[in-house]
Image (cartoon, rainbow, N blue to C red):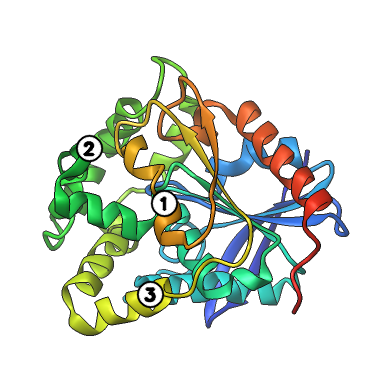
Amino acid sequence: MDLEHLHVTANGLRMHVAACGPANGQPVVFLHGFPEGWMSWRAVMQRLGEHYRCYAPDLRGYGETDKPADGYDVVSLTDDVVGLVEALRMQSPILVGHDWGGALAWIYGHRFGRSLRHLVVVNCTHPRTLFRGVVQGRAGQHRKSWYMLAFQAPGVPERLMVADHARLLRQGFVHLEGRPGALDRAVVDEICNRFRSAADLRGPVNYYRQYARMLLAPQGRELLRAIYSQAIPCPVSLIWGDRDRALSQELAQESHRDAGRDVAWHPMPGVGHFVSLEAPEALSAEIRAIAEATEITAPAPAE
């Protein structure tokens, strides 16, 4: 299926968005994680695009989307997404997010969930649940999340990760696959080849830095508490590749506590962290089943 490449102004940002599917189809928005980009969703979009109108942006700091010096906090990043939804005049989209895109999807759900038909998160624990797990040292999450602390060093992570043709980035993908050889290596190369200098990675790494600053600042913590105090009003599903070495499944299954609602659990046995790059056909089937069930059981949210 052919993809369109759009450039949309959202929240003052010029965003690159890949799109496919019928103009009158149910809109589905895909948010990528670190260090991916829109192309991590391409295989899923091509499988769903016959019936659904699919959009996958490069998020702030990635690819052809603007790379400003600031705005990498979760409020600005979710404002980018709501601006995109508004700019493209979507009605009751399904929002799908993985990894960092999943964290933004959770927060979007708290802030703007009434505008969504369904929230689908792929291998991302609710941010509040994850932070609590790290602080409490539960399920080994503090050891799994060591890199988040390393990312706080100014300039160093970017230089290390782009060195030797982004060797560390490539190794990170391979380390997190569920089965040896399961990842789509061509897409991994496509992703990694976009990071040719430390400046190319500065925005993506700043997601981690800005989130840490928010957690350390009293006003930032208060803002997050206010966001999380509003239960997510739309249906939520959590799809989980159960061989994820970066995130604890035990903690992920507690995400409903902070979402403020039931969260439907959809396990994907034998799949690692980068689900869309490892099992796009199975992931597409899960998303399609969720979307079809939502159409039957839940009317579009009121404006």
Q: Identify whether 195 is placed above or below 227.
A: above
- Which of the 4 image quarters holds residue 228? bottom left
Q: Residue at left 41%, top 51%?
A: 255
Question: Which is more N-terminal, label 1 or label 2?
Answer: 2
Tell me the distance, in whole angstroms, between the alpha carbons under discs 2 and 1: 14 Å
Tell me the distance, in whole angstroms, between the alpha carbons under discs 3 and 1: 32 Å
Secondary structure at numbered mark 1:
loop
Q: In the image, residue 182 lies at what x, y percent?
A: 47, 19
Tell me the distance, in whole angstroms, between the alpha carbons under discs 3 and 2: 36 Å
Residue occupying the far top of the picture: 180
- Which of the 4 image quarters holds residue 298? bottom right
Q: Amino acid at mark 1?
A: Ser
- Which of the two residues, 288 or 32, is positioned nearer the viewer here? 288
The disc label shown at residue 139, or none: 2
Q: Amino acid at mark 3?
A: Pro
Pick the quarter of the image with the N terminus. top right
Q: Which residue is mark 3?
A: 68
Pick the quarter of the image with the C terminus. bottom right
Residue 103 can be seen in this image? yes
Characterize the local packing of mark 2: few (<14), some (14-19) or many (20 or more) Cα atoms within 10 angstroms: some
Q: Which residue is mark 1?
A: 255
Q: Amino acid at mark 2?
A: Ala
Q: In the image, residue 87 lies at what x, y percent?
A: 69, 76
- Label count reads 3
Q: In the image, residue 152 lies at what x, y percent?
A: 15, 60
Circle 2/circle 1 CB separation < 8 Å:
no
